[in-house]
Each structure stands twice: as C-alpha cells, then as structure tokens.
Image (tube, coloured by chain):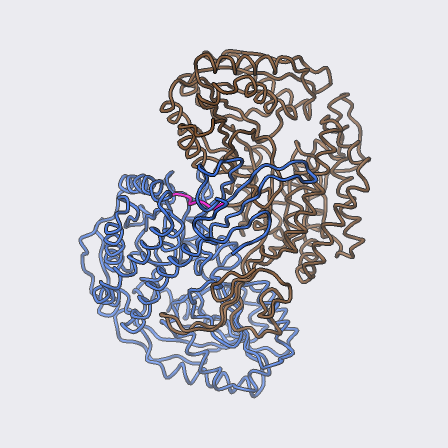
Chain colours: A blue, B brown
Amino acid sequence: MSVQSYNPTTGEVTPTGFADTSSDDVSRLCSRGARAAAVVANYPLHWRAALLDAMADALEDDAVTIRALADAETGLGDGRLTGELKRTCFQLRFFAGVVRDGAYLEASIDHPTDSPMGPLPDLRRQLEPLGVVGVFGASNFPLAFSVPGGDTASALAAGCAVVVKAHPAHPRTSHATFSALERAAREMDAPEGLVSLVFGVEAGVALVNDPAIAAVGFTGSYAAGRHLFDLASTRAVPIPFYGELGSVNPLVVSRRAAAQRATALGEGLAGSVTLGSGQFCTKPGLLFVPTGDDGDELVRAAATALAAGAGATMLSGAIRDRYEAAVAHLTAVAGIRPLATSATSTSAAGSFAALFEMDLATLAREREVAVTEVFGAVALIVRYDSLDELLASLAGLEPALTFTVHAADDDPDAPALLAAGRAQAGRVIVNAFPTGVGVSWSMHHGGPHPASTNSLHTSVGASAIRRWLRPVCYQGVPAAWLPEALRDDNPLGIPQRVDGVLRV
Amino acid sequence: MSVQSYNPTTGEVTPTGFADTSSDDVSRLCSRGARAAAVVANYPLHWRAALLDAMADALEDDAVTIRALADAETGLGDGRLTGELKRTCFQLRFFAGVVRDGAYLEASIDHPTDSPMGPLPDLRRQLEPLGVVGVFGASNFPLAFSVPGGDTASALAAGCAVVVKAHPAHPRTSHATFSALERAAREMDAPEGLVSLVFGVEAGVALVNDPAIAAVGFTGSYAAGRHLFDLASTRAVPIPFYGELGSVNPLVVSRRAAAQRATALGEGLAGSVTLGSGQFCTKPGLLFVPTGDDGDELVRAAATALAAGAGATMLSGAIRDRYEAAVAHLTAVAGIRPLATSATSTSAAGSFAALFEMDLATLAREREVAVTEVFGAVALIVRYDSLDELLASLAGLEPALTFTVHAADDDPDAPALLAAGRAQAGRVIVNAFPTGVGVSWSMHHGGPHPASTNSLHTSVGASAIRRWLRPVCYQGVPAAWLPEALRDDNPLGIPQRVDGVLRV
C-alpha cells in the first residue's frame, strides 16, 4: 500500500512516494541490523559518541526542511517544532555525553579474594548491547519521540542497531529525519543498516515478531502498546517491550496554595491543559481543587483563560474525532458540569479545548471517567472538601506518568500528598506543571502500569540507555582478552567499582 | 492437601504437619505483605541492613537443625550444606552491605539550569521499592536459592516484602529457614507479614496472579518458568517475571590447552559435571574437545575419573527418573557413544554419572540433544577438528548462563572463542569451571532466553536488587519533602550524581 501524508491544517492528502514495507523487507532489514549491531558493538565508545553528535549536526543541517515537513504533517507550528528539533539534537548530544561518561556500563571489578563462602575468583561485569532494537515513533512528537527521538538515541548510544517503524501521521517527516541520520551514519562509516525505517501496520507487527529484534521501544496509546506488548511477550523467544503509554495525570491544588495564588494557578492549569492541543501523555487530566471561595476563584480563572483560547489544530482528523467523541461523552455524564470551551479552530483537524467540573462522589461513581485518558485539550476539575477524602480518592486512581502538587511553603498537607504521588507515579512535581519532560540525568518518564508496560525503566533521560543493555560477567579472563572497560588500568577513564568500592 | 517430606537417601515419606496454602490465604498474605512493604519503604536504610544481618544471625543460630533437615530432604550431604548455609548467610550480609553502600539507589540530582532546550527545572531521581515480591524456591539449593536465598535477600534489601512459595522437595527446610527469618523480623519489630511462606502448586499460581504482587523471582526448569512467565505477562496488570531457568552450558578446550594439560582438564571436567550430582543450572553440558592425541588423552582422563565415582543421591525419585530416562535416550542416539558411567548410588534416589562422546556432525544433526538441558551428572563431549567448524557449531547453539574456555597463555584461538561466549552467555569463564557462582559485586547469573526469561537482570550478585526497584523522579520538590538520598546535604553519605557528575 502506498503511504499518504495528511495535512491537518489544510486537510490535503498527498502521496509520499513511499510504500508500506513488506514483511520480507522487514525481515531483511532486521537481519542486516543484527549484522551491523555485531560490528558496532566492538567499535570504541568515542566512535559511538561521535556518531550521535554527527546525527545531531545532520538534523540541524536539514532543519528548515524538517521543520516545514513536520509543520505540514502535524500542524504543531514552527515555534513548537523549532523547540522540538533543538530538544531532539540536544538529546542525541546528551546521549553522546552519557556514552563518554561511561558509568552506564556499570563496570565492576572484583579481584580474587577469600570470603566466608570460600575463595572467590576474579570476576568482572559490564553491560553490553542487546543487538537490534525496534522503535515505534509517536504521533505527538514527530521529532523528539519519533525517528530521531529518545528511543533511537538511547539505543544507538547503547551500541545497538535500530529499525524504526514510522508513525503514519508524519511519514515525510519520518523519512526526512531518517535520511539525516542515515547520512551521518554513512559519513561516520557505520556499517550498512545500523538504522532502518519501515512503514505500515503490518511492518510494525513483523518488527515485533522478528527473531533478530532484541527489544522494542514504543510510545503511543494503551491499546496499541498493550497489543504489541502481548506479541513481544508471547514470542517463542520473548523480548522486553518498553511501552510508554499514557495516563490520566492527577494534579492537586492544596487548600493553602489555592488561598495564596488562585488566579495564577487557574491560568497555569488552563495553559498546561491546552499546550500542544493537549496532545501530551503528561497532560494533567484530573485537577483536584478545594471547595470554597479560593477554589471557586481558581476554577473561574481557569475557565476564563481556557475560554479565551482560539482552539487548535490536532494531529489528524481521526484524533480530533476521537477527542470530540470523548468530550461529548463527558458532557452526557450526570454530575459532570461543563465549565468552559474555547473557540474552535477552523483548520481541517481543528478543535476546541474544554473544561469540566465534578465532585469526588461523581468521580468515585464514574470509574471509567477517572481512569480513561482523553488525548486532547480537556481536563476534569474535581472539587474536594477534606484532605482525608482527597487522599482516599487519589488512592483509588490508576498509576500515572506524573503526579503534581501545588502547595504553599510548609504546607501541612504536602507530605501526605507527595507520598500519594510517589506511590502511584513515575514523576512527582511540586509547584509546576507536568507537561514539560526535560532530557537530563535525573529525568524519569514512565510509571506503573497502565502508564508504562515496564515501570522499571524510563524512556527519557540518561538511564533510558539501560533498556538496551544486558550484563555480562567475565571470570578469570586475562587482561589482554578483557573488554577495555574492565581492565585494571582503566584505559577508558570511566567509573569502575573495584573490589566493592565505587571509583570515579 | 497435606504436605509431605521425602527423604531421597532412605526413601521415607513423612507428613510435615503443613498443608497446601489456599488461594484465599495466598491473597490474604499478599495483601498483608503490601501493607508491610508500604511501612518498610519508609524505614531508614540502616534498619533494612540490620534486618538482613539479623536474619543471617538467626539462620546461624538454627544451623544444626537447618542442616539436618536439609540433608534429610535433599541428600546433598552435610559438607555441601554447611557451605551452602555459609553462603546463604554471607549473601544476606552482603546485601546489607549493598544497602549501606547506597549506590543501588542511583541517586541523581540536577539543579535548575539553562540548556539548549531551554530552562530545566530541579530534577532528582532515585530507585524505590516495587512492593511485594513473589519468590519461588529452587529444588537444588535448599538454602541459597530457596526461602532465605538470593531473591529473598535482594528483595528485602530493596525494601520490598516477600511471599515465598516453598519448593515441594524440601518443605521442612523451607519452614525452618522461614521461621528463622520470621523470628529475626519480629526481633527487629518489622511489620507483620514482611515475609510469608506458602505451599503447593495452586498457591504458586495464585501468587503470580495476585494483584498485590509486583514482581516474581523464580529459579527452576524452563517449562515451569515459562508457564509462570506467561501468567505474569498476561495478567490485567503484567508484572516483571525473573525466571532463572537453565541451559546447556558449553565448555571449550582449545587445542593448545589440551596439549598443555590434558589429564588435569579431563579430571577437572569430570569433577565439574558430577559436583552436586550434576544438579546445577551451570553444569557444563557440552564439552568441546579437539580431535587428536591430546584430546584423546583428555577424554580418557575424564572417563577414568568419572568412572571411579560412587554415584550420588539425587534430590528426588522423580528427578532421578527423569535423569535416567534422558541418559537412556542419549544412549539410543546414533553417533553418540557412551564413554563411561560411574557406580550407582544405592540410596533411594541414587543414580550414576555418565559421559558420552560425539562429533560436530552428530551435534548438528541432533539439534534436540544440543539444546536440551539434562539435570544431573551427565555431559556430552563433542570432538572438533578446526577452530572454524567449532565456531560455526557454537554459533548454532542456544544462549546459556555460562560459557567456558580453557586456553593457553597467548592462545591464538582464545579471542574468537571468548567473542562467541560473550554473544551467547551471561558469564564467560577462562580456565575454570562454571559450577561455582560466587556472590559478589561483579557476579552475573542469567543469560539470554532460554537461560533466563529476562536477560537484563541477574539473580545473583549485588545488582540482583535492581529487579525490585523502579525509578521515581522528583521535580521542584523542596528539601524538607525530599527523600534523604536526594538531598543536597547527602545525609546518608551515599554516591550521588550531581549535575551530571558522579560523586562518591
């Protein structure tokens, strides 16, 4: 089937010249990737870091083209896409730094010793690349979570090859960014097939099932992610599947915070809910606001700010239709009151933002509403009376990617709220909004199921590399035959744990 | 159903007074464990370390009873069990050290900064306990891989609660060791239910399916492990399942090594194959020996040493029967020549050791033989002519827990053999035997499927703790509300990565 490109602003559908990748071709690309991975696993760390830097450079060289294609295919706007391309290049260079740092290898050296168990031999351990990784690009970040995104960057940093399944919402952008990565790989004399690109739903299924694929990174909906996770887990040789899905991210405004800064919080909430047309997996979906005058003022400010919006272009007509159906469904639920809607964008996949209000009793009754993520610029404000009933309600929610608390200094309610968040989310935020996910050493993006299919690992930040590595232990191996990271003279100058003592 | 204890030396079957745990009781114990885990997650690290130390002390206090019960139930002998109890206590204290070291928390602090992506907020990340862990005791290590074994030790070290499913081959030993752990927990004022014990196949299934269980550690056969992995993966909320299964561990003797020390290697091989009646998942199963005089001498020495053995008691009559059926099957395969058998032990579950010989062509033809682990003291010697055909044969094997190379100094064949091992195994060993698995910072016990259901993590060694932890990121959280490990003043004195720089 030929691949088409949809412009959500104009509604225009144009042929791309690309075709869905056949299962045979997927198999061929995966096998080629396995050969490339076997070669690259033996390249020095500085080569791998330089490759990532070269890929960032290549994307920047093609920035004008890439931004234009991405804007045409997503309607996200040049401002957002300029920022996202910067983030994408930063991310590649950041992982070059992670590779150069070398701590990710978890190099550990135990010299022979006596122990209460008896003599222990010379044992050395490091992490080594898994092989070929399958990556599924996400619709909502056509750069940073797509072909040149965090999964690809971290997998290449680990020394793996990558086969990316392009998201159908931005095939041209996928191809243009892939071409930049491929050009950089060629310039670095990388083995053929270190990075490949495939198109189509069947190709995605073939990718997850391919014997050469060692692990999969996915960002997308729960339904698609769980389906692919099930495929990955039921293979003859099961493989790790890292699905970053989504969640109804709770946000709590404490009574004191509402008293201190109701208007600013209301406006901030509206901004976070409508950012990127609400098409973020970290969009706050359930906003817990105290009853009473301060809470009322906050809700009014949020409604006013949201109502002043012009609406926005969503990523596709299908996404817009699902969003509007979900909003219509909310409108029909007894106990859920519409508070405000924005204007509706007139673009082809244009829509509006919406805000609803309900109480804790309604939330408890409408379990589906409480746990169903709506992808788009809608949020439910939930009014609560007491901390105790709020905590009981929070404990009944499903785990999430993020949990946000707005609190005052020395807020007596904050510790209990933070504990609730810590128990149920991957990132706990105080006095900010969850919609920004910075790339850094300390970022964690993921959460207990259903936010992720694997809560032990992250898809953003330095430790995302850990998903593509497995430990190998060397026992009694002479220095000349040891990997460099495990030699006593530490030629790479990396952190090593030596006889139980971490050295940097 | 009432639980019975079998003595493999005498054949005696006696009632234990224990009964299979009902599904309701499993559910109750898991829920109680979840409450205990929530409490213990907030206890200081030094309490957790002291608990592990106290558990080691309690096991030592009960050593005489425990060793006697274990010997009666396994026939492994007091010497081996004395060593195994030492190892078990060492392992608990070792994990106390891992907890005190604190690096396992992966504490990372990023202060607010500007980046090419724009401003980044204050972000801090650490690993936090998952909750309640299910542990399946193994038959072949009634102490070190059973109730008080590495899974339990690492899960408690992580701050989790544990529900152990006792292995039916040693119920009394399971209960006695559990009682010691429980007494230590009581003395440390641990919350009720931090450690629980259940009996029976149905209880095991209920454990894997229980909503309160956050992860499972398992050591045992591929069939049982894969079945439970499938259950864990197809739950409404899938959970990580760490199955350490087994493998046909290849061992290669290079041509030069055979020339240098044929007799010693032959005797060493026989010793490694028959150690613990061959009931180790790391038993070398395929022994690649060069053709020619040196190889012949090595094979003769191995056969002579093995034939001189008295046979041994296996863990149960059923295990002995499966072992002897597998040996009979090998005897019937064309191209596989019986080389030697030991005497047969006269104990109730007594058996013999056996050694076979074949060539590479037979190995290639008899794929099932090449990839089927036989639990017991049997090994196949495979004779090879050239390095190239050996490497081709090795590449066709399935991944394994271990891969062993016996080589000479400056052996020209060693690098290629080590590369083959690195690609296919979790531990690569030079000039030693794989049957010892020391507990240390650098040990890795695990391997690509089918050796393990999860090749990214280990069941032995310091990093086994990583299986029971998930990252949590704190954004903009004031110092007073931060976990201690993430405070700028580092009150725990643990390694922290601060603004990208690892500090110890």
Residue drawn at x 81%, y 42% as measured from the top left: B61
Q: Which of A279 and A415 is in front in this view?
A: A415
Q: Position of residue A485 (x, y in %)?
A: 46, 47
Asked if residue B269 lies left or right of residue A185, the reply is right
Q: Position of residue A19 (x, y in %)?
A: 22, 49
Q: Is residue A372 visible?
A: no
Question: Secondary structure of the magenta portion, mostly?
Answer: strand
Asked if residue B10 lies left or right of residue A133, the reply is right
Q: Position of residue B157 (x, y in %)?
A: 65, 52
Asked if residue B69 lies left or right of residue A305, the reply is right
Q: Can residue B248 be seen in this view?
A: yes
- Residue B23 against residue A251 in the figure, above or below: above
Q: Quadrant of residue A339?
A: bottom left
In the image, the segment drawn in magenta is A126-131
* Quadrant in which the N terminus of chain B is drawn: top right
Residue drawn at x 37%, y 39% as measured from the top left: A212
Q: Which of A191 and A201 is in front in this view?
A: A191
- Residue A120 against residue A276 in the figure, above or below: above
- Residue B410 against residue A31 in the figure, above or below: above
Residue drawn at x 34%, y 56% as measured from the top left: A137
Q: Nearer the viewer, residue B363 or A70?
A: B363
Q: Which of B293 and A314 is in front in this view?
A: B293
Callout count: 0
Asked if residue A141 lies left or right of residue B441, the reply is left
Q: In which quarter of the image is residue B490?
A: bottom right
- Residue A115 against residue B35 in the figure, above or below: above
Say if the magenta span includes residue A48: no
* Quadrant in which the C terminus of chain B is drawn: bottom right
Q: Where is residue B265 in the image (x, y as percent from the top left)?
A: 55, 21
